[in-house]
Image (spheres, rainbow, N blue to C red):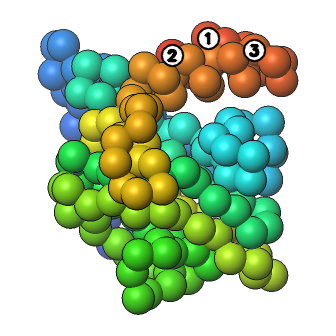
């Protein structure tokens, strides 16, 4: 149940009884999503980490918080599908664009975009909420395809990390919807 209202105008409103449809799964609720507990951040590259928040293996989608505590780099990649990003803290951007994102900035990446994600030195760590749909296609120095990374690679990477840090490999499955 939600926290009890005290002075809110809706304090006498009763919650609905039928919250979920018969085949619906419960929501994913994570308190303190951009946590300071680094065990939840899975190494994505040597300098950038990912905290998974929600994963759909059947739709090849995930939401995460990407974090870099210092200058960071994610491999060059291409998105065949859209990506949404909201900057929580720090400073980041793409080498291929003329903007640099800081806290409060929103980015919509169109399908068909290739780029090189970089995190800048900043007093606050870079923390960005991403919604990723479909695979990342790794690119070589000339922008040509050189491998891929999809939701199944992400899940395996997370399982291995969570097993290693004592959270347990099965934790990742609590985020599946």
Which label lies toward us, 3 or 2? 3
The Cα–Cα distance between marks 3 and 1, rounded to whole angstroms, is 8 Å
Please name the residue that numbered disc 3 is placed on: 163
The Cα–Cα distance between marks 1 and 2, rounded to whole angstroms, is 5 Å
Q: Is label 3 in contact with label 1 (beta carbons under 8 Å)?
A: no
Please name the residue that numbered disc 1 is placed on: 170
Measured from the top left, where is residue 103 in percent x and y? Answer: 56, 80
Say above or below: 103 vs 53. below
Measured from the top left, where is residue 67 in percent x and y? Answer: 66, 57
How would you rate the neighbour count of disc 1 (Cα within 10 Å): few for under 14, some for 14-19, many for 20 or more? few
Give 143 or 35, whichever is nearer the viewer: 143
Give 2 or 28, whichever is nearer the viewer: 28
Position of the C terminus, as image quadrant, is top left
Dot 3: element: helix
In this image, 161 relative to 139: left or right?
Answer: right
Dot 1: element: helix
In this image, 149 relative to 57: left or right?
Answer: right
Measured from the top left, where is residue 174 in percent x and y? Answer: 51, 20
Say above or below: 15 vs 92. above
Q: Is label 1 in contact with label 2 (beta carbons under 8 Å)?
A: yes
Q: Which mark is residue 32?
A: none
Residue beneath the point at 26% across and 61% down: 113
Residue beneath the point at 63% across and 17% down: 159
Measured from the top left, where is residue 73 in percent x and y? Answer: 63, 59
Q: Quadrant of residue 128?
A: bottom right
Q: Which mark is residue 173?
A: 2
The first of marks 3 and 2 along the sequence is 3
């Amino acid at each position: 149940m939600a926290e009890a209202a005290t002075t809110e105008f809706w304090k006498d409103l009763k919650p609905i009884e039928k919250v979920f449809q018969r085949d619906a799964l419960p929501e994913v609720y994570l308190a303190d999503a951009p946590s300071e507990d680094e065990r939840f951040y899975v190494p994505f590259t040597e300098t950038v980490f990912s905290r998974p928040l929600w994963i759909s293996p059947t739709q090849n989608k995930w939401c995460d918080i990407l974090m870099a505590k210092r200058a960071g780099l994610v491999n060059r990649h291409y998105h065949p599908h859209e990506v949404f990003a909201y900057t929580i803290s720090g400073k980041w951007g793409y080498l291929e664009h003329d903007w640099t994102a800081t806290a409060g900035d929103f980015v919509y990446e169109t399908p068909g975009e290739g780029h090189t994600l970089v995190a800048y030195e900043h007093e606050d760590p870079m923390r960005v909420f991403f919604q990723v749909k479909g695979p990342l296609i790794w690119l070589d120095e000339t922008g040509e395809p050189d491998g891929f990374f999809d939701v199944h690679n992400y899940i395996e990477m997370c399982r291995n990390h969570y097993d290693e840090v004592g959270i347990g490999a099965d934790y990742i499955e609590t985020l599946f919807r």
